[in-house]
Image (cartoon, helix red, strand yellow):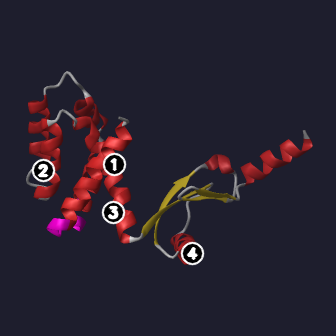
Amino acid sequence: MSESIVAYRYAKALIDLANQQGVVDEVNKDMSFFEAICDENANFVAVMANPIVRHDKKLSILKKIFENNVNNVTYSIFSVLTKKNREKLIYPIAKEFQKLYNLQTGVQIVQISSSVALTEAQKAEFAKLVSNAISKQVLIEESVDESLIGGYVLRVGDTQIDTSVKKKLNELKLALS
């Protein structure tokens, strides 16, 4: 079974348990915290995925970092995964959990790439326009890509709107070929 399917199943079970316990917002914060640690520390991710490191050692690492810093429901998934030798799935589960949480709360992640950093007013305008179009609360994830030259690339789910100068130059190049 593919890793993403297994991660989704664990994330679904975790969000169901968190909903039953009434701690879904706390577990969401914990999973965001875990993602941030993984994003900042590649060695931590490597240790969790390394089959040579014993599972009890991995659990002791998780215990030292998270036991007193996260909700018991969140810590329980770490413990279960370690006992089942699936520590490398914790990060993908955290990602899947975030998707499920956003779906449950009506939040849509929107990625915007532009050639220069957007101002707060521009971000707010994008958020307002997209929110009105899709009838969901919007969270903006911005990135700067100087190769776009100008304009922006907006991604909402599977939809992409590309108004970049780079794209227009490529279209002109193809038309002249």
Q: Is residue 35 visible?
A: no
**Where is residue 91 shown, x and y percent of the image?**
30, 44
Residue 29: name its quadrant. Answer: bottom left
Q: Which mark is residue 125?
A: 4
In the image: residue 155, left or right of residue 80: right
Which residue type carries mark 4?
Glu
Please tell me the numbered disc located at residue 101. 3
Whether label 1 touches label 2, CB < 8 Å: no
Residue 17 lies in the magenta-colored region: no
Q: Position of residue 105 (x, y in %)?
A: 36, 70
Which x, y percent locates residue 85? 18, 32
State the CA–CA distance, disc 1 to disc 2. Answer: 17 Å
Marker count (numbered): 4
Q: Which residue is mark 2?
A: 76
- Against 168, is 54 above or below? above
Q: Quadrant of the N terminus?
A: top left
Q: Amino acid at mark 3?
A: Tyr
- Few, some or many residues within 10 Å of mark 4 (<14, 14–19, 20+): few
User: Is residue 22 within the magenta segment?
Assistant: yes
State how far apart marks 1 and 4 are (Cα): 33 Å
